[in-house]
Amino acid sequence: MDILSSLATGFAAALTSVNLLWGFVGCLLGTAIGVLPGIGPALTVALLLPITAKVDPTGALIMFAGIYYGAQFGGSTTSILLNTPGESSSMVTALEGNLMARNGRAGPALATAAIGSFVAGTIATVLLALFAPTVANLALRFGPAEYFAILVLAFTTVSAILGASMLRGFVSLGLGMAVGLIGMDSISGIARYTLGVPELVDGIEVVLVAVGLFAVGEALYGVLYQKEEKGDRNRLTSLWMTGSDWKRSIPAWLRGTFIGFPFGTIPAGGAEIPTFLSYSAERKLSRYPQEFSAGKGQGAIEGVAGPEAANNASATGSLVPLLTLGIPTSATAAILLAAFQNYNLQPGPLLFQTSGDLVWTLVASLFVGNAILLVLNLPLVGIWVKLLKIPRPYLNAGILVFASIGVYGMRQSSFDLLLMLAIGWIGVLMRRLDFPVAPVIVGMLLGPMAEKQLRNALSISQGDWSVFVTHPISAAVLALTLVVLIVPHLLHARGVRLHEDD
């Protein structure tokens, strides 16, 4: 009953006219920017984060809920129409969705993606409301040693999942951790690694790094290395799904939801794995295997419905560790963590106690955002298709201008603009050398937290490092970390392929 009453209070706040307006604006902006080629949810949130600096925390977080879901749907639109995934989790959607679009079935593909996102997001939000407080209560029993062990597991798994190479993922993570240590030491109060630059004493803003790596890096990379695509755009046909499409999509939505949500709730999560698992399950369970891309067919609708549901459910599930443990399991969640910190809100075990009204308003806004997204996007798909006709040079220029205005507006500092451009060129180099950029943000956010928990644990144990293996939970989590590190190498040594092309 406490959960229901808290959720009812959240709906009362989320359904006010002002907050509904913020939710609508968030969905509209998230979809509009997320639908552009090569732009995913993480980049969308990073671009729009500075805009909410003057908005009250409740309205800002509701707006970000709309941006979060809107950008997720926008990435699927890009994948289906242009075969250009906005992020790695949209790659699977492009396999069948673009094939359907090429064969005149872009409408049903976009419709099943939108409705599947609504179904998965709604079910996953119910699960979030039911289980997030339980996870928070369990987290209250964790001490610094347990918290540090979980952060080590998060470092390991997120770096492995967000990059094609575990080694390159760790390099990116290390870079982010190094940047995160710049500035004032939270315990001793001594400035470190500032190189005598006064502007670095307060540290480097996470938003600045996110905008530089994602937005500026992507735009500069597009200018240097990507050619403008020419040729006919895939024409959009009817939006209506047939009875057979509904019959094939509904089970795929449900399977995708219950595959995606668990992966989002654990530090070893990430949307890439559940989308691939969902796609694999749909291929094995489908009565029409000849329609899948591997069978050189015309595109199977369940190959779009399942992965899109898994992607959206995983995105919602990632809010569980974010809200209860303060651990982001995706690049977008990492930037949302920065949004919380901008309002002096620290996600963690005490968040439901110290800011319960705000959290339950956010949970309620996820339901509202899902409904707004569905109502908004089904009739407006044709407009998003027209946005995709923007020439790439103008698109890249717009991103650079938007990013510069947003970063300069944070502190009105020209040094921040120069730093953003320098970080953008680092982002270009990382993309050119195939280093993932998302672990940099994770390292920046979690590195200082891990350092603090490590020092607290050693302080409590009077310098005894065995505290991490004598506590059962900490020892178990560290053992799991070793498994994550060792098992892929053992499988590789035995000749087992982790991603096999059927």
Image (cartoon, rainbow, N blue to C red):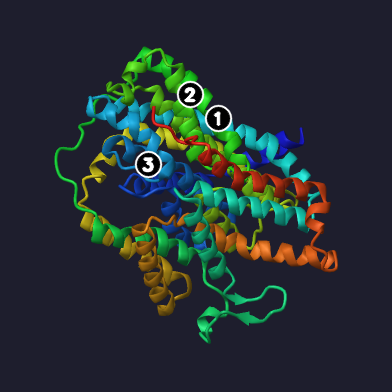
Query: Please, what secondary structure does the residue beneath circle 1 have?
Result: helix
Query: Please, what secondary structure does the residue beneath circle 2 have?
Result: helix
Give the residue displayed 38% in from the left and 39% down from the top. Answer: 91
Dot 2: few (<14), some (14–19), or many (≥20) neighbours within 10 Å? some
Q: Are marks 2 and 1 in contact (CB under 8 Å)?
A: yes
Disc tally is: 3
Quarter of the rendering occupied by the N terminus: top right
Q: Which residue is mark 2?
A: 281
Q: Which residue is mark 3?
A: 74
- The image's mark for residue 4 is none
Dot 1: few (<14), some (14–19), or many (≥20) neighbours within 10 Å? many
491 lies above or below 278: below
Q: Which residue is mark 1?
A: 259
Q: Most extreme residue toward the left, as rendered?
A: 231
Q: Position of residue 237 (x, y in %)?
A: 24, 26
> Residue 364 lies in what quarter of the image?
top right
Does residue 79 appear in this view?
Answer: yes
Q: Position of residue 118 (x, y in %)?
A: 48, 31
Q: Look at label 3 and name its amino acid.
A: Gly
Q: Position of residue 271 (x, y in %)?
A: 50, 40
Give the residue displayed 69% in from the left and 79% down from the top. Answer: 189
Does residue 117 appear in this view?
Answer: no
